[in-house]
Image (cartoon, helix red, strand yellow):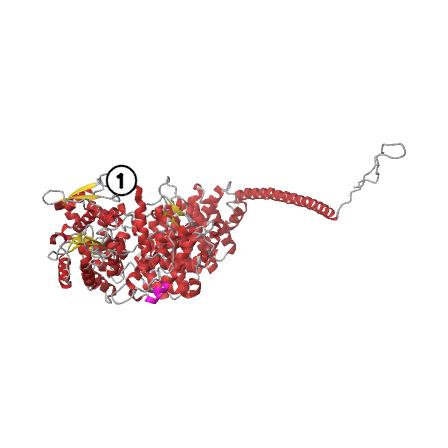
Amino acid sequence: MPFKLSYSFEGNYRTRPEQNLSGDSRKETRERLILRAHEERQKRQEQRLKLRSTLIIQAFTRSYLIRKHVKQEERVKYDQLEDQLDLKQLLGKFLFFYNPQIDGHRLLRICHKLLQKQNEILQLLDFDETLCWLIRRLLCLCLDGLRNTELLKTSIECINVFTADANSRAKVEVWPYLATKGYFSRLRGLLDDGFEGDVIELIERPFKSAISFSILQTNLLLSEFCSHFLCPKISSQVKNILIPYLQKSSVFPYNDLIKFLNTNKNFDATNSLLYCLLALEPSHYEPSQDSIQVLATLSLNLNQLSILECNDVDDSDDEEMEVSTEQVHLQDYIYLLNHSDRVKRLILFIDEHNRNEEVLMSIIQLCQNLLLVYKDAIRKYMLLFMLALNGNFLNKIWELITKDEVTIKQMNSTSFSVWKDVHKAILVFCDMFTFYTETLTDSESSDTSMTFKNSNLSSMADILKNIALSMIDLAFPMCRSSAVLPSRELLHFYHSCLNCVKTLYTLDLRKNFCKAGFWTRQKINVSQDLPKKNYLSKTIKPFYGVVSENEDEHLPPLSTIEQRSLAILQQLPFLIEFNVRILLLRELCRYSIGDNTRLHREFLSDNVITIRRRYLYEDAFEKLSYANEIDLRHRIRIQFINNVGLEEAGIDGGGIFKEFLNEVLKTSFDPTRGFFLLTNDNMLYPNPNVAVLVENFTDHYYFIGRLIGKAIFENILVDLPLAEFFLVKLLIDRVSAYYLKSLDPILYRNLLYLREYSGDVQDLGLDFTTINNDLWETKVIELKPNGGNIPVTNYNRLEYIHKLANFKLNTQIKKQCNAFQEGLDNVVPLLWLRLFNHLELQVIIGGDTQEMDIDDLKAHTSYGGEFTPDHSTIILFWKIVGKFSDTQKKQLLKFVTSCSRPPLLGFKELNPPFCIQSSGNENRMPTASTCLNLLKLPVIKDEQSLKTKLLAAIEQQAGFELS
């Protein structure tokens, strides 16, 4: 800006102010001019609208005042001419001025007049359109009069009379009109208020004319009926009076209702509507595609009832469920859905139409909705139960799933952002296949009852294993941006898929349809922090993380990789190699008490327990009970008292306790003591009738379970051949029917025969009972309530097989197994043992079942006395042992260590190490100290003589007695 001088050279240093008389010099821009013009137009428009509104209000007000005046004039004329005009004119005038607030008594009078001449009016209705229209309008006023106690009786009578003739054209046309004017709404109010008599018949009456309605009229009527009776919350009057009445009615259009609900998706799909639909179903109604689709749609929100009511239901079939204050409870739905005739017809329809993909998807949707209600829904709903045992149905679902094999194999964590039909199919298949394999699915000569071939099972395992790992990745995302909000369906899918993979793994153990190394093909790293901090004993929730039961315990957060590996360890441990899991178990045991704690206890406490050999079990039960020895994880020293009452020489450095543990367990599991019995193949299992022999038998099983836990904790092998089903029972709560083969092979074969029987099963004379022999007493046990009166038929034989196997394997030894589990869990948590399957658990308890590796034994053997690896007797010994049969090798190992099986990870784990010590000249016999894993071998230089004496010793299993 140029500098302006503030003075002049004319001698006047002050400047004169410049004045501009041309007005404001600001120039208005184009945009502002346009905006100002727009605002002015808007103001003019608003003025015109105000003027127009004023005229409308004035016109309306004048119209209202004129109408009011005219109506009042007509009302006065009506009162003057009431007795002179005919009914048609009188009714026309009355409808013109009627005001419910002041004309109630006039409505009452005209209704009485109409009722007095009802026969005459009814004859004219079909011919006089004007009169017909006037009567309709009057009936609408009567509907409003139902709210007035003074008009109630007359209004009901009027409606009753002028809608009575179902075949009349006028009556047929009146129903759609009345339905739109609140007919069902008014009647619902009356019904809920306790008016039952004519109201029930009036509710049914429109449906008597339904056969003459058009499709639009029928849908209108059903829409209003559903909106006011079926969809809202059900009252006791609707449940106990209306629904049973309409269910027996021959005129109620149930099939039309099904079609309406299937074609009109705008209605409110409430649980009340589902209940009413099930309760209204005629006794001989045959299912259709429409009815299946409607059930699938209406059952969508059924799981909400389980949230409102009792969500944790006991497995027992006869336990009473907790209920809410609602008129309709969850058990009401179960009762209706489990109606035997309904289930039979549905199963038959599904078998005939399962090739129809629409029907199949509707059934899958219905099954998913029911599965989401309960954790163990298959055992609650008979439809699910029967479908889960239907191998053909399962096959159709799997074919549907694998229809697009490329999509299935490429399914990953991002595929679950939208819940699709294939996800529903997988969820239903996983739940049902898991249940299917719990029944007798394997015959002696076929694979899974010929439902799935080995190639199908292998493909299934591959697909579902990948989906399960993807679900774990989804449940524990790498970053928050990739996290998803878990729905009820997604959470159920997570657990169903993982459980199905477990089932396939268990099935593979006995059928071997997967290639070697399939399950451990994908390397999974296990962090060392997991055993140190005992994260494995914590609960890890999908889509949440680790949950600590102790609020005061603050553990460092796990990384996503560690959370995933922990989830795999807890849910799918078989995906990790066996040796890795064994080492993990060893670490868990070591870190559970800490080395410092154990050393401190050993030095500061004299934990020596005195045991009399003559009363080995009794003393052990007393001294090592939970009351006297709370924590068996710490080291225990044993002092034996011999048969003459003197203390045996020697200090327990671990070997004497090992001998003690082996002897006590041998005594505990001895069938003559009564706690355990032998199967036909000489395997041990709990005695079902032990309560007859020992009153406090649960304490004994708890004690024996603790001893087994101590053996596992100390890595002491005990030679106990436990029955397969009992090993499974230690790891899971419910054993499937397949394992009945390990308990009673004859019963198992009989049940297989029953399942495959082609004739009429009822001819076999079976019912839902079984006979139980309690030593001296025979009892008849019912497998279900009133089972003695329920015959076994072709329809329910699978249920009979399932319940009988469940009784034999689970119910009758439940208390024994629970006590044993609790004792075992007291020393080694069951969560740790569930890292292994039942066959691996037998290996952990009793050692490896594979052929003994003599080279490994030789490499980890120490020598004492004059023996060295190069001694001639030692050279002969290993030469002889190398030629032993497998049985003789096991006898040698049992002779020295008291267990015929080698340690899990080789002889490097044997503690104390295998040792051979010289015991004098050749006149002596070989002896052993099992507590020290010590073989005392005489110095013999003749091979045949050494072999003869060695075989004599190990075959007699004499031990110290040969010294």
* Residue in the foreground of this view, choosing between 115 and 647: 647
Name the residue nearer the viewer: 376 or 410.
410
| 729 relative position to 294: left or right | left
| Whole-percent x, y for residue 929 in the image | 17, 51
- Residue under numbered circle 1: 601
The magenta segment: 453-460
Asked if residue 459 lies in the magenta stretch, the reply is yes
> How far across and how far down the image is residue 131, in percent?
50, 53
Residue at the spot 17% in from the left edge and 45% down from the top edge: 650
As drawn, the residue found furthest toward the left would be 644
- Left or right of 107 on screen, residue 963: left
288 or 64: nearer the viewer: 288
Q: Residue furthest right?
A: 10
Residue 59 lies in what quarter of the image? top right
Percent of width and height locating residue 493: 39, 55
The N terminus lies in which quarter of the figure?
top right
Q: Main secondary structure of the magenta part?
A: helix
Whether residue 474 is in magenta: the answer is: no
Q: Residue 947 falls in which quadrant of the image?
A: bottom left
Q: Is residue 482 left or right of residue 14?
A: left
Task: Tell me the amino acid under the disc marked 1.
Answer: Arg
Q: Mark 1: which secondary structure?
A: helix
The reply to whether residue 442 is visible in this rendering is yes
